[in-house]
Amino acid sequence: MKRLRERRLRMDLRERPELLLAPAVFVVTMLAWEFAVPAFGIDDYVLPRPSQIYDALRAQLADPLFWGHLKVTVLESLYGFLLGVAAALVLGTAISQVRLIERTFMPYVVAFQTVPKVALAPLFVVWFGFGMTSKVVMAAVISFFPVLVNVIEGLRSADADRIQMLTVFGAGRFQVFRMVRLPSALPFIFAGLDIGIVFSILGAVVGEFIGAKEGLGYLLLQTNYNFDIAGMFAVLVVLSVLGLIAHFIIRFAQKRIVFWAEENRAIGA
């Protein structure tokens, strides 16, 4: 039994070498970082060692206030992501299916897309206040565009021959949409969701930078004011883990829902 497990493990490593390479790169990088900082005489307040970042992270995880900040950022990101996705699905479907709507609204969408989304954060704080609403709107705006573009391109990527065949057999517009366009668009939509969920976290944190009383962005500013560089890195680690978890959730859902489709390249924001 033990030999069988070892044989399976060796086969997995041959077929998927990244299972070994990914943790190896992480370990080598952390060790090099740990010993390079004192070797080059870099002060800890400029670039803390991984061991110091780990200690700061443990201290934060043991603090109940930290979990309150984490909860706020997660909720802001989630609400903003859901709002942005809902708007992108509705508008993207309308633009891709109705030529008049495309000609009417697409120029405004393109013009608004060229505006740096981060620059809108102070305006949202003025409009919606320092509470959660301004962060949710910021997260929604940033996550909206990658989903919108992928929805439009996905719905337009449907096979014309299949659409023509269904039309010949008397299928209506909604039937064509449900049986051909939507299944063809799902891989694109999930690619957009994968980008959008990460962007929503970015949007929430940027909003907290501009004006907030809680959240990981607010905590990041506090550690900066206190020259707690190790604490700043610890918060960045948490944000990275949060983004990875969100990414894997979307990927897991994609493999379960769109299991028949090959991976498509996402169209970025």
Image (spheres, rainbow, N blue to C red):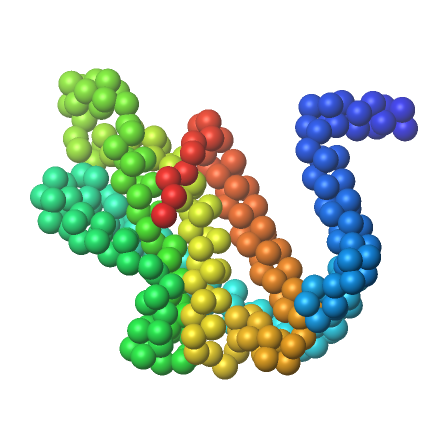
At x 52% / y 65%, what residue is drawn? 74
- Left or right? Give the position of 18 relative to 5: left
Q: Is residue 69 visible?
A: no
Q: Would you place residue 115 above or below residue 220 in this image?
A: above
Number of numbered discs: 0
Query: Is 139 left or right of 72, judged from the image as shown?
Result: left
| Residue occupying the point 80% across, 25% down | 10
Q: Position of residue 23 (x, y in %)?
A: 74, 42
Q: Which residue is more in the foreground, 217 or 153?
A: 217
Residue 80 percent location from the top left of the image:
40, 62
Q: Position of residue 113 (x, y in %)?
A: 28, 53
Residue in the foreground of this view, choosing between 47 and 109: 47
Observer-nearest residue: 58 or 206?
206
Rendered residue at 23%/50% (across/down) = 110
Would residue 113 be found to the left or right of residue 215 on screen? left
- Residue 243 in the image: above or below residue 55: above
